[in-house]
């Protein structure tokens, strides 16, 4: 009698694992205007030992051409010793691109965005792992010490003169921060993609019309939850106020979407050179065409290098008889690597296109 529910649960878990990266990534989406400011809200009580705070953020829904708020929530760490690096929006030369968050042994770069509650733009001050247990910093976390005894108190000193609620890096009015060598090293370490509970949480937020920025004007009625996906009850926290007035451009939506279901570098098509410019200035045209050729050659070389690396990992997994969980983590890592590479390539191409010589009345393209 218990066989069918077990099978259903296994199938559900497998389905969530398959869609987890693509549902969460938003890689390949370029939005012409930045997300709203981060709203003002309080953190709900931590539900138990081992939960780590994942701050709320604005995501993009291309179906509605609108940002929507993904509430902050407590998530059980997928492995002992792993911390959460939040996702972040950054200017990519032609639009704002989303960089997916991930789990890893070190906190990487998250755009310098001050999400609060331990995430103040660099690293994480909300807690640490020690002896296989997570210890919470009570100065930045809402902890019930009756239930959770792994706590400490460390005052965090940061700039409180100006409270910056800007939610994106670069562009007009964005945070001007760059990754440190340590943060760059953290990005190259082994990662785990958002866990199924985070994927469900994201989908629930996307399906809630009240969380769209056009409906709440930057002040979401569900700003944070104690557990992922629980959007009702006494543990739900509403925003006290918007971080800043929200004034989206009148001509939205304006997005460029590219396929987000690429899983491996072997599935990426080689970049092709666009038609050469013909502005009437042969010297400038030749220089720009050389820059295009150099960029495309470099990007295609990166395709090949990543493909060789991923193929070698597949071979090792086969030789070592990796189990299903290990294979799933490897596939998620490969998908993240591939999509981040293509996101970076898109931004590089957009930056080069902005430097394309203008036609000043000479010969016109045929």
Image (tube, helix red, strand yellow):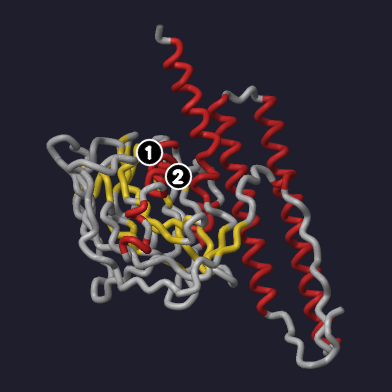
Decide which of tag 1 and tag 2 comes sooner along the chain. 1
Q: Are marks 1 and 2 in contact (CB under 8 Å)?
A: yes
Regarding mark 1 in the picture, which secondary structure is present there?
Answer: loop
Q: Which residue is mark 2?
A: 103
Q: CA distance from mark 1 to mark 2?
A: 8 Å
Instruction: Please give the label number shown on residue 77.
Output: 1
Work out whether residue 87 or residue 130 is closer to the camera in this orientation and state it. Answer: 87
Q: Which residue lies at the image location 48% right of the left edge and 70% below the top edge? A: 33
Q: What crowding class fits label 2: few (fewer than 14 Cα within 10 Å), some (14-19), or many (20 or more)?
A: many
Seen in the picture, residue 214 relative to 63 is either above or below; the reply is: below
Work out whether residue 350 or residue 323 is closer to the camera in this orientation and state it. Answer: 350
Picture coordinates of residue 333, whole percent (x, y): 58, 42
Residue 121 lies left or right of residue 149; in this view the side is right
Picture coordinates of residue 135, whole percent (x, y): 27, 42
> Image quarter for residue 92?
bottom right
Q: What crowding class fits label 1: few (fewer than 14 Cα within 10 Å), some (14-19), or many (20 or more)?
A: some
Picture coordinates of residue 311, whole percent (x, y): 72, 38
């Amino acid at each position: 009698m218990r066989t069918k529910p077990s099978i259903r649960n296994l199938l559900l878990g497998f389905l969530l694992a398959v869609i987890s990266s693509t549902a969460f990534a938003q890689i390949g989406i370029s939005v012409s205007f930045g997300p709203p400011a981060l709203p003002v809200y309080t953190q709900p009580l931590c539900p138990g030992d081992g939960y780590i705070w994942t701050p709320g953020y604005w995501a993009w829904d291309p179906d509605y051409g609108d940002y929507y708020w993904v509430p902050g929530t407590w998530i059980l760490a997928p492995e002992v010793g792993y911390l959460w690096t939040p996702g972040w929006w950054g200017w990519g030369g032609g639009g704002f691109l989303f960089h997916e968050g991930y789990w890893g042994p070190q906190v990487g770069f998250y755009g310098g965005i001050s999400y609060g509650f331990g995430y103040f733009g660099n690293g994480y001050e909300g807690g640490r792992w020690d002896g296989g247990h997570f210890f919470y910093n009570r100065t930045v976390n809402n902890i019930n010490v009756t239930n959770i005894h792994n706590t400490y108190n460390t005052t965090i000193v940061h700039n409180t003169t100006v409270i910056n609620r800007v939610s994106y890096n670069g562009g007009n009015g964005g945070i001007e921060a760059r990754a440190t060598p340590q943060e760059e090293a953290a990005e190259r370490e082994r990662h785990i993609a958002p866990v199924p509970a985070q994927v469900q949480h994201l989908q629930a937020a996307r399906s809630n019309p009240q969380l769209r920025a056009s409906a709440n004007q930057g002040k979401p009625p569900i700003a944070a939850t104690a557990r992922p996906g629980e959007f009702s009850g006494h543990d739900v926290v509403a925003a006290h106020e918007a971080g800043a007035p929200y004034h989206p451009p009148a001509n939205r939506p304006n997005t460029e979407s590219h396929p987000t279901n690429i899983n491996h570098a072997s599935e990426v098509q080689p970049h092709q050179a666009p038609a050469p410019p013909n502005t009437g200035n042969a010297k400038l045209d030749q220089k720009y065409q050389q820059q295009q050729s150099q960029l495309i050659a470099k990007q295609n070389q990166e395709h090949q290098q990543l493909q060789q690396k991923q193929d070698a990992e597949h071979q090792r997994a086969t030789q070592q008889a990796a189990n299903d969980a290990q294979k799933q983590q490897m596939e998620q890592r490969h998908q993240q690597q591939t999509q981040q590479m293509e996101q970076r390539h898109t931004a590089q191409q957009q930056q080069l296109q902005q430097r394309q010589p203008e036609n000043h009345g000479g010969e016109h393209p045929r």
